[in-house]
Image (spheres, rainbow, N blue to C red):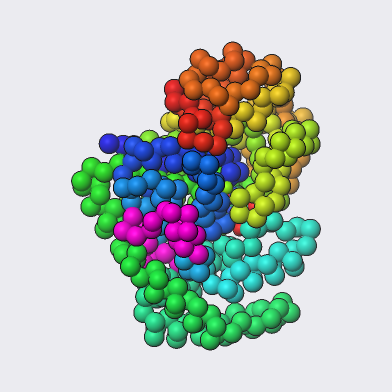
Amino acid sequence: MVNTILIGAQWGDEGKGKIIDVLTAQADVVVRSQGGNNAGHTVIHRGTKYILHLIPSGILRRGKTCVIGNGVVIDPLALVAEIEGLGDLGVAVGKNLLISDCAHLVLPYHRMLDEQRELLKGRAKIGTTKRGIGPAYGDKAARTGLRISDLMQPVLFSEKLQAKIRENNSILQAFGAKPISFRQVNESYLAAGEKLRPFVTNTVVWLHRALERNKAILFEGAQGTFLDIDHGTYPYVTSSNTTAGGACTGSGVPPHRMDVVLGVVKAYTTRVGEGSLPTEDAVIADMLHEMGREFGATTGRPRRCGWFDAVAARYARMINGIDELAITNLDGLDSLDVIRICVGYRLKGKRLEVPPCDAAQLEDCEPVYEEMKGWKTPTHKAKKFTDLPMPARSYVKRLAELTGARLTIVSVGPARGQTIIL
Ligand code: IMP
Ligand code: MG
């Protein structure tokens, strides 16, 4: 059985949730290793739409174990709400969910600081999801964070929380924001902690036992390569390692136990929030929004849209070691006459083959395009590769060729059945 790391190779929202849901059929365990409830993975199954934020998308399949690893930051109230929301939709969450005791907590002051810092930045804002993700990882790196293991020890938790709230209230005061009530946070978090207690364990040990028993593990990436804290378009990034290496550090499974890296890309490009998007294009954005597509699953914001960026995809292949490529949302391009692909950047007359590190330089990059013929035929009913119109086949093959990875999946709609396996 193979262990697979699945990552987003663009700016997030590549359709990872749907691909994970399909691949979970062959996996025993699905692991989230980074990010928090900034993520929004949409899965449509039997006409019901599920949006998952913290729980791995594998939860929708019976008999699979889902693990929230040490690298994730958890807002306990949001997690309890998600568990209960799934219950309401008939998805039982019990022994099929495990939560790492080392995962850090997102607290209300993280959310408030996230909001205040964005306000202070004004036009230079990052456009975060305001879920407190940056400040929570900030505390983790500063070694002042609270973890699930703290929450499991109420007396200790209350003591640490009181000190943290005192400190953060003075910071919030400096921002001119309202202070936070210790009592209220303490009560609500401890109550959520009790609901989460049955799921909490040492997930590193559990995962290593699963490895010994040859279980197939699927690592579910959240966000995308260009939102990675190290490799993304800094500072317009999220605060975790969204790239393949994050699956190891965020789970405690070592690199040599990973077998395959699967990169997921849309047949075009989207981004939510601020920061450069070299291939951004109003025509394709209007077309997709008119079709009712490309609105954020977490915040409802319309996503920015552009042509496929092969410069970015190639770089993502390099960083993640992408072996296999899944191309999603091909059907979104069904009505176009001509489709553009960005094959290079031009910066001050010089051609670049990889994105520059500097945000201002990236902003100045002009995409160099090649054009392909559109297929002007609906593709959402295609079941196998040869059902696709010839120009659509040429298009996805070209994307894989430019990316430098083997094309293994093409998705032509949100349902499980709308997935072509090559
Ligand atoms: P944060 O993760 O909330 O701090 O947001 C930082 C940046 O990452 C913003 O541009 C967000 O829009 C973006 N972002 C965070 N999570 C996701 C996601 O799951 N999909 C797409 N963009 C995301
Ligand atoms: Mg999403």
**Residue drawn at x 56%, y 29% as measured from the top left:** 412
Q: Is residue 334 above or below residue 244?
A: above
Marker count (numbered): 0
Quarter location, residue 121: bottom right
**Left or right, 408 with reference to 293:** left
Please check the rendered image and state whether residue 114 is part of the magenta-colored stretch, yes or no.
Answer: no
Q: Position of residue 269 (x, y in %)?
A: 65, 36
Q: Nearer the viewer, residue 8 or 48?
A: 48
The residue sitting at the left extreme is: 213
Q: Is residue 146 visible?
A: yes
Comparing 82 with 321, the one in front is 82
Residue 82 versus residue 247: which sits nearer the camera? 82
In magenta segment, residue 100 = yes
Q: Quadrant of the C terminus?
A: top left
Q: Residue at x 71, y 43 (%)?
A: 304
Where residue 18 appears, as percent x and y from the top left, is: 50, 40
- Outermost residue on the top side: it is 390
Q: Residue 374: which quarter of the image?
A: top right
Residue at the image point whose x is 75% and y is 33% from the top: 287
The front one of 359 and 270 is 270
Where residue 320 appears, x then y in whole percent? 47, 39
Q: Position of residue 373 (x, y in %)?
A: 69, 16
The residue lying at 72 percent from left, 23 percent from top is 336
> In the rendered structure, which segment of residues is drawn in magenta?
81-104
